[in-house]
Amino acid sequence: MVLRPEDIITMQDRLFSFCRSQAQKKGNDYSGNSEDTFMNLRRVKDFKCTENDMLTVLGELVKKCSRLSNFSQPGFVSQVTEESAFDTISDLINYATYWQMFFEESKGLPKITRNGKPLPVEYVQTGDKVIPRLIKKKKLKRKTSVKPKRKASLKRTVKVVQK
């Protein structure tokens, strides 16, 4: 099977849309009425299970990678029927996002916004400083199909039928 760049973008759109939906639903379920959607992850640190929130999330990432490894084994049949490999991939993406957010929080990195909306930035180490750099979207070159031109001489004829 040959995968084109458009196929990857289509899968990412589908997957990321699902990730956003799951992050919102699970954030509500795990945080209850709290304003902090990461309350459940921060509680692990409170119970002295890990030193920081990033290690808590790292533990979740390891669990999800282990689950994917099991899905990859020939003949594996999941006993948890309500969580597919697709769900596990979604969880991995969301936990990786949480890890990045905790990392930026731990470093005191600024949130870059425009009109109140966060901008995509990466943080680059320059000497002893970490500075944000805007990530520019790359446009894919898409194949365009050439539509045949209609001949100007083609006219639709409307026939009026009287009773």
Image (cartoon, rainbow, N blue to C red):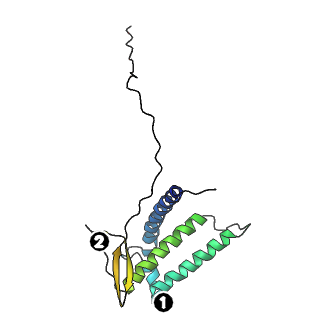
Q: Could you say whether the residue bearing mark 2 is in a helix, strand or loop?
A: strand
Asked if residue 39 is positioned above or below residue 145 in the image, the reply reads: below
Q: Nearer the viewer, mark 1 or mark 2?
A: 2
Circle 2 crowding by C-alpha within 10 Å: few under 14, some 14–19, many from 20: few
Asked if residue 162 is positioned above or below residue 128 in the image, the reply reads: above
Residue 105 sits in which quadrant?
Answer: bottom left
Name which of mark 1 and mark 2 comes first in the sequence. 1
Q: Which residue is mark 2?
A: 113
Which residue is drawn at the image coordinates 47% and 69% (left, top)?
A: 26
Position in image of residue 42 (x %, y %): 44, 83
Look at the image and tell me in which quarter the N terminus lies: bottom right
Residue at the limit of the structure toward the right, as seen here: 75
**Residue 83 appears anywhere in the view:** no
Mark 1 vs mark 2, CA separation in Å: 34 Å
- Which kind of residue does numbered mark 1 sit on? Phe
Q: Could you say whether the residue bearing mark 1 is in a helix, strand or loop?
A: loop
